[in-house]
Image (spheres, coloured by chain):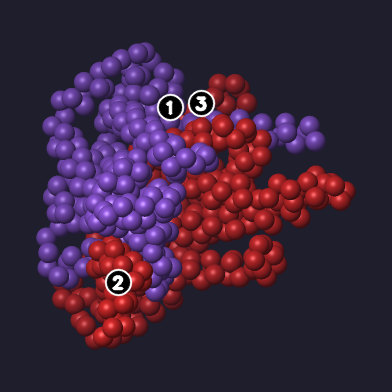
Amino acid sequence: MKRVQRWLRGEGAQGLFLISPTLVFAVLLLAIPLIMVVALSFWTQDYLTLDRTFTTANYQTAWTEPMYQYLMARSLKISMFVTALTIFLAYPVAYFISFRVPPKRKAMWIFLITIPFWTSYLIRIFLWKVILGYNGVINGSLTGLGLIDQPLSFILYNQNAVVLTLAHAWVPFAILPIFVALEKVDRSLIEAAEDLGDSKLRRFLRVTLPLSMPGVIAATIIVFIPTIGDYVTPRLVGGPNGLMISNMIELQFKKANDAPLGSALAISAMAIVTFVSLIFIWLNRKYIRGPGA
Amino acid sequence: MKNQGRFLKWFMGLFLVFLYAPAFLLPVFAFNDSSIVSFPLKGFTTKWFSVLQSTEPLHIAARNSVMIAVITAVFSTLFGVLAARASSRFKFPGRRSIMGFIMLPMVLPEIIIGVSLLVVIIQLGFELSLWSIIMGHILICTPFCIAILSSAFMNLDQNLEEASIDLGQTRWNTFRLVILPLVMPGIVASLLIAFTISLDEFIIAFFLAGTEPTLPVYIWGQLRFPQKLPSLMALGTILLIVSIALLLIADYFRRRGIRKTGIENSGGFL
């Protein structure tokens, strides 16, 4: 009894007590719904009646039907390209802010980079359609300058447009973790490398880059996982060949009225991105030794 | 050496053009006197803004969105305060995994959250309503609130709290009179961020909206009609100005909070 009482007055119990409302909310609205989606994916639905006998039929359809295989592979490919492009754009920007901007100005620069992100999400994506379209900003100005006769058609209603638009939407989320990681890099280590005769490039590759890898990994995860579930961008700028798995998930849940198959597709997509992310983290641990490795 | 500096500057210039292109075009088309959203520009007009004024369904959707955003901001900040305080002040069993779980919606695709809430609501036989959207929004906003509030709570000097208790104040009074005023700027920033995220959120609202649309759901419906596009540009311009104003206020409070706790400002919050 005494021990229980002492524990109840201690730090552990107080912390748990304090966090319990948030935790209960998350369990009710996140854990239980996710478990129900998993359960649903093992059931079948015939029009409106739900058959609760356990079956893996939905997963068989999701993994063997060529249409779903194709959509899944394409979504994965688009997400990977988006992630690569985003990191490629974000790293130099984060580096610039961390190493070139005077400390007093850094907050302002970070703010500057997050502002466009607060344009309405839907309207922002729609505007990319205007920029990339046949009579859009890019084609219009290129034709006006006499550089091209025909509008460029490879920039709208295809996967390139989806990758570009998604990279634009996610780049602030990649800059921030990389910036934070670069800020933590001990400047004296770079000076030490300089004193020991390393060239600028070598210093970057052997000191700055490995030490900022945690930020790059965080950015990769933050961008890669959510982009596979993007619905609006493929619908607005993707055209018929740019649709992604989430468009199919929505179709199954709404028009096709097959929520179990939609659940199986959603879970499969999540399982694949999680698996790819874990491999990525593991490869990084193995080949690039960051701090604490 | 010089080359690298020049490369970075060029890169930054091009990057900012890329980043600001849509935000820059938005007001351009909002004031453009043409019913087609494309170049070349015609002339200056404010008629698209008056079109907005007379569109009744838009006002209803906007009212719904504001109501959802206010309730979401209050509750996610409340949940955020509890979680941020608990994780920054106390060590308790399973702290890391509990926090990881609560922060999960930050990396989960929104469509997964939308779908899973839809499944629960339908299976339990509830009606879709604005409340289902509010629940989803609180879920995705809470992690952002925790991220902002955690830094506010972590910057607190624990000695102040102990001094207050040594001087005979109760725990509740200590929280109310010592801790709360110090983290207040963080709370205001958290409210504003949650409000802004909720106001703009589309996917969850799209899945969970019953008969009453939110502003983004309304915009989505209108994007199909070419003749509605110019007035949507006007609407987007208004929304952009509102968001930036809210963010500037949020950032002002965040800075004030940092100054209060006497720690050097190290960067933005998002």
* Residue occupying the point 34% across, 71% down: A10
The letter of the red chain is A
According to the picture, the residue beneath numbered tag 2 turns out to be A9
With respect to residue A7, does A293 lie above or below? Answer: above
Residue B140 appears in the figure: no
The letter of the purple chain is B
Distance from label 3 to label 1 (Cα)? 14 Å
Residue positioned most to the front: B167
Question: x and y percent of residue B261 in the render?
Answer: 43, 42
Asked where in the image residue B51 lies, by quadrant, the reply is top left
Circle 3/circle 1 CB separation < 8 Å: no
| Frontmost residue, B139 versus B268 | B268
Mark 2 Cα shell of 10 Å, populated few (<14), some (14-19), many (≥20): few
The amino acid marked with disc number 3 is: Gly
Disc 1: host chain: B
According to the picture, the residue beneath numbered tag 1 turns out to be B25
Q: Nearer the viewer, mark 3 or mark 1?
A: 1
Q: Is residue A31 left or right of residue B270?
A: left
Disc 3: host chain: A
According to the picture, the residue beneath numbered tag 3 turns out to be A140
